[in-house]
Amino acid sequence: MDTMAGDVASPLALFGAKLAGAIGGSVVSIAYLLPSGRREAAARFLTGAVTGLVFGGPAGLALAEHLDLAGRIGAAELALMGSAAVSLCAWWALGAGQRFTDGLFSVAALKRSVGR
């Protein structure tokens, strides 16, 4: 089996792969759960694109190690895979975090913690 571990990708190729993954993940996120309006669609798209570009590389490496793909796929594929995964999951992770903090800081939660 040929491995692509020795492949060296240019910085432009890696950026292009991360950009393609981030945009692809954002589009799938929007298509999977339709936004309530244009503003939410734009926010979701930009959130996915930015998080995919920023965290795509490390996420791709982590996924490759978890799926035992390290050393079998090239750097561009790692960047594409990580960016798409991060971009797809970003909106849901932010939503879960918001629900958690809303519950944590709600008036009812404060009353329960005080004991009233």
Image (spheres, rainbow, N blue to C red):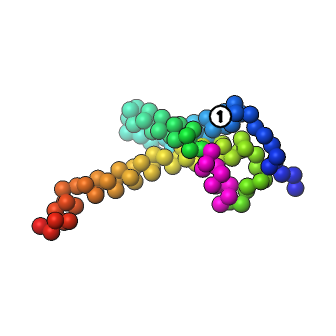
Picture coordinates of residue 91, whole percent (x, y): 45, 46
Q: Quadrant of the N terminus?
A: bottom right
Q: Quadrant of residue 77?
A: top right
The stretch of residues the image draws in magenta is 57-66
Q: Quadrant of the C terminus?
A: bottom left
SS assignment at label 1:
helix
* Residue placed most toward the observer, 81 or 60: 60
Q: Is residue 62 magenta?
A: yes
Horizontally, residue 97 falls left or right of residue 8, namely: left
Check the image and report above or below for 11 versus 6.
above
Please tell me whether residue 87 is drawn above or below residue 115 in the rendered image. above
For the stretch drawn in magenta, the main secondary structure is helix
At 55% across and 47% down in the image, what residue appears?
Answer: 86
Residue at 68 percent of width and 55 percent of height: 64
Going by the picture, which residue comes out furthest to the bottom?
115
Q: Which residue is mark 1?
A: 15
Res. 22 image quadrant: top right
